[in-house]
Image (cartoon, helix red, strand yellow):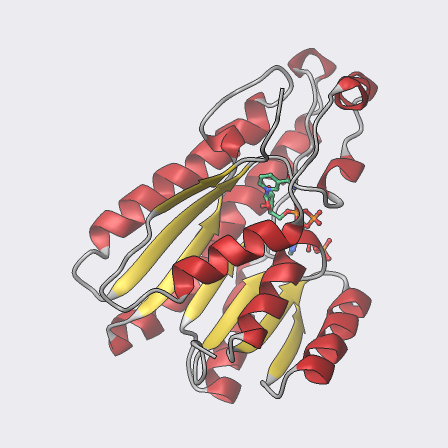
Amino acid sequence: MQLKGKTAVITGASSGIGEATALHLAREGAAVVLAARREDRLAALAEKVRAETDVRVMAVPTDVTNREEVESMIRRAEEELGSVDILVNNAGVMLLSFLDKGKVEEWERMVDVNIKGVLFGVHSVLPGMLKRGGGHIVNVSSVAGHEVFPSSSVYSATKYAVRAFSMGLEKELSRSGIRVTNISPGAVATELTQHITDPDVTDMFAKQKLTPLESEDIARSITYAVTQPENVNVNEVIVRPTNRK
Ligand code: NDP
């Protein structure tokens, strides 16, 4: 119970890595604020957290592309739970496509969710964290924020942006008591690939021989980073599956 007395906000908590992370942080004693758009999924997770732990839990339907919604979710968390000590900026979409398909709306969506969503989250928690002289911001980037492959140009651009922003954030906050972790997962078995609309990309994935990681594998890495002693600032984590081709 290393996070007893702390509050963690997890965006994209309605499935995959965010859902697993919320559960792990709650098991470590943190009060959790679950943010994403699908209310039914957030409510089901909130029930699960309550059944398994005695931490406080709030499900706050939030679209991270909407700055006012993000700010009001963070204000509610601060008012009802006292403070936000940990923000996990996890919400993301991976709409891979080949550039000649011209899926400009999907590019815009990735920029809005993956980049702006992270910026809005950080903007909303910073005043409180700076005032208290402490906190932890975890940004979920990707191995695609370190490497680019055909069909990942725009997705990778957003995840490189997350990593670049994490680096700048860490440097600017290095004397503030606020810790910053950028985490870059490799392939994880979640709903992420289900939203891809380019059949050439789905075909490419179908041919890949790879045993992906599970959401729990990433949740454990995030939990590791946020449960280190106060003087330890884990800035960069890359987690890939073993035996990838
Ligand atoms: P999922 O599709 O399972 O989860 C994505 C989450 O993001 C959902 O909870 C979804 O909730 C939320 N989300 C999407 N759009 C919005 C929005 N506009 N506002 C609020 N929440 C939103 O995928 P993962 O768990 O895999 O993805 C989590 C993160 O991990 C992403 O940032 C992804 O890029 C990253 N990642 C994943 C990898 C993988 O292989 N799975 C590898 C590397 C990084 P809802 O739809 O309810 O709003």
Indicate the position of residue 233 as horizontal and vertical percent values: 28, 57
Q: Who's the residue at 24% across and 73% down the image?
A: 133
Number of numbered discs on residues: 0
Does 232 appear above or below 198?
Answer: below
Of the pair 184 and 120, the residue shown nearer to us: 184
Q: Who's the residue at 62% across and 88% down the image?
A: 54
Of the pair 185 and 57, the residue shown nearer to us: 185
Does 46 appear above or below 95?
Answer: below
On screen, residue 100 versus residue 180, left or right, reads: right
Residue 69 visible? The answer is no
On screen, residue 167 versus residue 20, left or right, reads: left
Indicate the position of residue 109 as horizontal and vertical percent values: 64, 39
Indicate the position of residue 148 as horizontal and vertical percent values: 52, 20
Of the pair 208 and 157, the residue shown nearer to us: 208
On screen, residue 19 versus residue 82, left or right, reads: right
Q: Quadrant of residue 42?
A: bottom right
Q: Quadrant of residue 37?
A: bottom right
